[in-house]
Image (tube, rainbow, N blue to C red):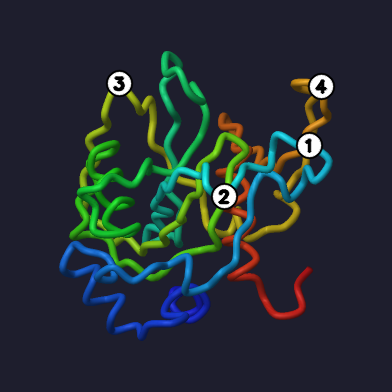
Amino acid sequence: MQERIRQRIGGQKRGQNDLQKGAKNGAGLNGYSLERAIGHSRGDADLNPHVDDMRVDEAELRPAAVLIPIIDRPEGLTVLLTQRTDHLDHHPGQVSFPGGRIEESDRDEIDAALRETEEEIGLDRSYVEVIGHLDQYRTGTGFDITPVVGLVREGFTLKLDEFEVAKAFEVSLEFVLDPTNHKRESKFWRGAMRHYYVFPHDDYYIWGATAGMLVNLHDRLRDEGES
């Protein structure tokens, strides 16, 4: 599976050696734009073409990046997620990937994702092998997110930012890749019925942009001929 991840996510425009070099240096791709390399985007509006406020003007989008950490465990690969604290003003209690806005001090999207991950959960970037990225994900709240995918070796220790992160937990990659776990739900909000992806998993409700990016991960890694 790790080889499939490298082949299907890594090195679409730059060689794998460039990706590896950037990861080892704790940097990204030296100014190389991940979005322009692919030109694909997904977002909240995909399931809601009828909802006008889901479509954000391109000029108003705010760049952000998250890390999708895939951990190499003896029992199999897992995906690391976080649950936000309940007192936050934005998306309290929701499940998310570590990440946030791209700052002027960040070299690129990869550097931003790694920095935010270190700040939020204490995962040192030296344990992360950056593979590549998924499609850009545009949220109805105006963020243009680059989902950076990294393979994480064991041996790390997490230290959560207690103000932002209530929990960090893992789900098996097998669970993510099983299409029977991809649900769609709806809710009437602000005058319109809105649809979104959901991954119901034990005590956690994984939905919205996070679930949408997991569906994208499945689409990249699924077996040939699988729907």
Q: Position of residue 172 (x, y in %)?
A: 52, 53
Distance, label 2 to label 3, CA atoms, is: 31 Å
3 vs 4, front mark: 4
The residue under label 2 is 58
Q: Determine the residue positioned at 22% across, 56% down.
A: 125
Disc 1 marks which residue?
51
| Image side of residue 104 versus residue 221, left or right | left
Closer to the chain start, of discs 2 and 4, is 2
- Amino acid type at circle 4 is Gly
Q: Residues within 10 Å of mark 3 (few under 14, many from 20)?
A: few
- Disc 4 element: loop
SS under mark 3:
loop
The amino acid type, in three-letter code, at marker 2 is Glu
- N-terminal of the pair, mark 3 or mark 4, is 3
Residue at which label 4 appears: 191
Label 1 sits on a secondary structure element that is: loop
Q: Nearer the viewer, residue 199 or 98?
A: 98
Q: Quadrant of residue 202?
A: top right
Name the residue: 60% across, 60% down: 41
**CB-based contact (under 8 Å), mark 3 and mark 4:** no
Mark 2 crowdedness (10 Å alpha carbons): few <14, some 14-19, many ≥20: few
